[in-house]
Amino acid sequence: MTTIPSVFFDHATIDTWIAEDAPLLDLTTHLLAIGGHPARMVFIVRGDTVAACTEEAARVVQHCGGQVQSCVASGSRVAPGTALLVATGEAAGLLRAWKVAQNLLEYACGVAGATARMVQAVQAIAPDVAVLTTRKHTPGLRRIALKATLSGGAFPHRLGVGESVLVFPQHRALLGDWAAVQARLAAAAPALTEKQCVIEVASLEEAFAAIRTGADVLQFDKATPEQLRAWCPQLRGQHPNVGLLAAGGVTGHNAAAYAASGVNALVTSSLHHAPPADVGVRVEPL
C-alpha cells in the first residue's frame, strides 16, 4: 500500500501557479474558438519512474474547472505508458491547466524517480543508512521538492533553520574558536534538552574537536568515502553514540560508496536537480 506524503499545499499556492502561466486569457484557444468543446486530457509517463505531486496536478485541473477521472497516487512506481492523470471538462479549462500540471509532474516525478534509485542503491549496501535531502533548492520549490523526495523514499534533513541546531563553520567564524562555541552550547544546554546538536566538520581533527565541544552528530562536508571509511571506526571506537553524516558531493553515482563508509545517513542536495521525467499529454474531444 502506497503512503502518500502529507505535504500541505494551500489553495492560494495552486492558484498562483495557474495565474503565473495564464493570468488573463489563452489567446490561442480563444482565436480557434475551441474553449467550449468537451474534452479529455491524459498525462502519460514515457519512462520508469515514481509518481509524485499527482494530487497537486489534479488540483490544478480542478481549479481550472476540470473533473479528475483518475489519478495515480504519489509514491507509486509507474511503468512506461502509465496514465498518471486523466481529466475531462471544457477545453478552455483543461488547456489552461495543461502546462502547469505537466511541468509540475515532470519535475516532481523526475526527482522522485532519482530519489528511489538512490535509496535502493544505498539500502542494497547498508539497509540501516538513510538518505536525507537538504533545503538547498531553488526558492519557492520547497513543498514540491519535499513531496517528490518523500515519494521516492528519502527523508528531510532539515526543512528550515528554525527546527534544528546545525553549527556550520560560518557560525564558528563569528565566535572565534571551538572554546567559544563550547561555552555557548553549555550555556544553552537546558534549551537543547529535546534537540541534538549537529556540527559540520571537514577533517578527523575537527570531528574530535566538535565532539569535545558538545556535538551529538557530526556532519562531514565533502569528505570522500575513503576518508570516512578510515575515520568512522576511530570515532565510533571512542564515541560509540555519536551520529555520523556524509554531506557535500553525494550523488547517485557515489551514494553506494558513501553508504559503505560507516556513516548513519547521507545528506544530499543533488536529487533536487534530477533530470525531469518525460510526461506526454494527449487532449482529445469527447
Image (cartoon, helix red, strand yellow):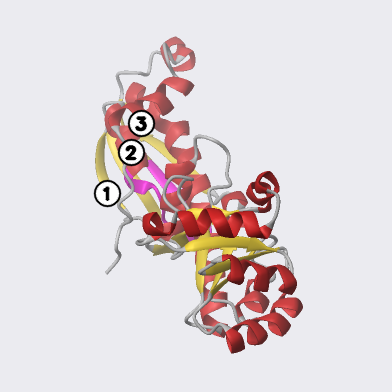
Mark nearer the viewer, 1 or 2: 2
**Picture coordinates of residue 108, whole percent (x, y):** 48, 49
Q: Mark 2 or mark 3, which is nearer the start of the sequence?
A: 2
Vertical side of 95 occupied by 157: above or below? below
* Residues rendered magenta in the picture: 42-55
Nearer to us in this view, 282 or 219: 219
Q: CA distance from mark 1 to mark 2?
A: 20 Å
Q: Is residue 53 located in the magenta-colored stretch of the structure?
A: yes
Q: In the drawing, what numbered circle is on residue 18? A: none
Q: In the rendered image, is residue 256 in sight?
A: yes
Q: Residue at x 69, y 71 (%)?
A: 254
Badge 3 element: helix
Q: Which residue is mark 2?
A: 9
Mark nearer the viewer, 3 or 2: 2
Q: CA distance from mark 1 to mark 3?
A: 19 Å
Q: Is residue 74 located in the magenta-colored stretch of the structure?
A: no
Q: Which residue is mark 1?
A: 70
Circle 3 crowding by C-alpha within 10 Å: few under 14, some 14–19, many from 20: some
Q: Residue at x 60, y 86 (%)?
A: 238
Q: Mark 3 or mark 1, which is nearer the start of the sequence?
A: 3
**Picture coordinates of residue 247, whole percent (x, y):** 63, 63
Circle 2 crowding by C-alpha within 10 Å: few under 14, some 14–19, many from 20: few
Nearer to us in this view, 8 or 184: 184
Amino acid marked by disc 3: Ile
Nearer to us in this view, 233 or 140: 233
Q: In the drawing, what numbered circle is on residue 14? A: 3
Vertical side of 274 occupied by 16: above or below? above
